[in-house]
C-alpha cells in the first residue's frame, strides 16, 4: 500500500473540520476539484471510504472518524516540531481566524494584539466582526469571542475581561426634552433604540435592584444588531439605548451621553475567547491563549462549558 502524503492527510483533516469541500478548499488554497480528486485518490489507495457525501453535506464514515481521532495528536506533534525547528528565528507561523463582536475586537486591539503581533510577527490574524452568533467550527474559524453567557456549552472558554456592566444612556438633549426616567418601567413611555438578537428576536432590557427584576420589551422605531451603532444612535438623539458600558465610554467621556437608571444596572460575566475542545488546537491559537493569560488581569483558566 502506498503511504499517504502529508498533504493528503492534511486535506482529510481540513475537510473533516470544515464539513465542506468548498470551505476546506478555500482554507487550503486549492480548487475544489483538486481537493476532491485528492480525497478520492487517497480513499482508493487505502481501499476505504472516509466520507459520506451528499449534495448538501459531508460527514465522516466510521473509518474516517477513527483515522481523524488517531491522526489529530500526530498533527499536533508535527506542528509543535516544526515550530520548535523555527524557534531559533522566533518566527512561529500560521493564520488565526476569529469571529468576534466589534466590542471584542476593540478589546483585542487595545490589550492583546499589540503584544501578540510584537512577539509573533509571522502569525497572521484574521478578525471577522459579526453581530450574529455563528457556528465557528462549521464556518471555519479557529475561535470566537462573545459574552460568556453566549458561549456554546461544549466549548472551552478563556476569560478576556472581568464583569461587563450594561448601562442605559441617552443624549443630554434627549434627556432635557423628555420626561425623567426614574424607574425601568418609565422606559415604556420613551423612544428606545432596540437590540435585535442573532436569532431575530428583540432583546429585552434587563434590570435588577433589591431583588426586583424586570425584563422589558421596550418600544422603539429603530432596531439595530450592533452595540456600537446603538450608542452612536443615542448620541445623535435618536432615543434611549441599553448597551455594554464599553460601547458608551467615549460618548460619556465627551458628554455626548448621560447615564440613566444607574442604580438598576446589571453586569454580564464578561467577554470570553472560546474554541472547540474536540478539534486539533493550532499552534497559533495556543500562542494566542498564552498571550491572553500573560496580558489580562482576570483569571484566564480554561473552562469547559
Image: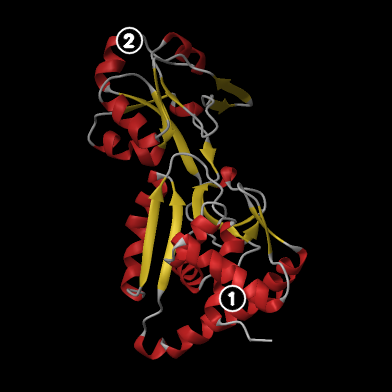
**Residue 120 vs residue 159: left or right?**
left
Quadrant in the rendering for residue 127? bottom left
Q: Quadrant of residue 102?
A: top left
- Which residue is at a point 57% across and 43% down the rendered structure image? 150
Q: Secondary structure at mark 1?
A: helix
Q: CA distance from mark 2 to mark 1?
A: 65 Å
Question: Pointer 1: what residue?
Answer: 9
Q: Residue furthest right?
A: 62
Locate residue 119, reporting x and y percent.
35, 75
Q: As displayed, is residue 86 above or below residue 152? A: below
Mark 2 vs mark 1, foreground winner is 1
Q: Position of residue 113 (x, y in %)?
A: 35, 62
Asked whether disc 2 touches disc 1, contact meaning CB atoms under 8 Å apart, the reply is: no
Q: Looking at the picture, how far across and down is residue 261, in whole percent? A: 44, 24
Task: Say which label, 2 or 1, has the lower sequence index.
Answer: 1
Query: Can residue 142 be seen from the camera position used here?
Result: no
Residue drawn 48% across and 11% down? 188
User: What sort of colour scheme is used for the picture?
Assistant: secondary structure
Q: Write down the residue under mark 2.
A: 178
Amino acid at each position: 500500500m502506498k503511504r499517504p502524503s502529508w498533504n493528503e492527510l492534511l486535506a482529510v483533516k481540513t475537510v473533516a473540520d470544515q464539513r465542506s469541500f468548498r470551505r476546506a478548499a478555500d482554507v487550503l488554497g486549492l480548487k475544489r476539484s483538486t481537493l476532491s480528486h485528492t480525497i478520492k485518490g487517497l480513499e482508493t489507495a487505502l481501499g476505504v471510504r472516509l466520507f459520506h457525501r451528499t449534495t448538501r453535506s459531508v460527514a465522516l464514515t466510521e473509518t474516517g472518524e477513527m483515522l481523524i481521532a488517531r491522526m489529530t495528536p500526530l498533527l499536533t506533534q508535527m506542528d509543535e516540531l516544526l515550530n520548535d525547528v523555527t524557534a531559533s528565528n522566533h518566527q512561529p507561523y500560521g493564520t488565526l481566524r476569529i469571529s468576534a463582536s466589534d466590542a471584542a475586537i476593540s478589546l483585542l486591539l487595545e490589550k492583546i494584539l499589540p503584544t501578540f503581533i510584537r512577539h509573533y510577527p509571522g502569525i497572521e490574524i484574521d478578525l471577522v466582526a459579526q453581530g450574529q452568533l455563528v457556528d465557528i467550527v462549521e464556518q471555519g474559524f479557529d475561535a470566537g469571542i462573545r459574552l460568556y453567557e453566549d458561549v456554546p456549552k461544549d466549548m472551552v472558554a478563556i476569560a478576556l475581561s472581568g464583569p461587563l456592566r450594561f448601562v442605559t444612556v441617552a443624549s443630554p438633549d434627549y434627556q432635557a426634552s423628555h420626561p425623567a426616567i426614574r424607574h425601568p418601567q418609565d422606559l415604556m413611555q420613551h423612544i428606545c433604540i432596540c437590540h435585535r438578537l442573532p436569532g431575530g428576536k428583540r432583546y429585552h432590557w434587563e434590570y435588577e435592584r433589591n431583588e426586583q427584576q424586570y425584563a422589558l420589551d421596550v418600544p422603539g422605531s429603530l432596531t439595530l444588531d450592533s452595540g456600537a451603532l446603538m450608542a452612536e444612535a443615542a448620541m445623535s438623539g435618536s432615543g434611549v439605548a441599553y448597551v455594554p458600558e464599553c460601547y458608551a465610554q467615549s460618548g460619556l467621556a465627551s458628554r455626548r451621553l448621560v447615564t440613566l437608571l444607574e442604580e438598576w444596572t446589571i453586569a454580564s460575566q464578561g467577554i470570553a475567547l472560546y474554541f472547540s475542545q474536540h478539534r486539533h488546537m493550532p499552534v497559533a491559537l495556543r500562542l494566542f491563549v498564552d498571550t491572553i493569560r500573560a496580558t489580562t488581569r482576570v483569571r484566564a483558566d480554561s473552562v469547559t462549558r
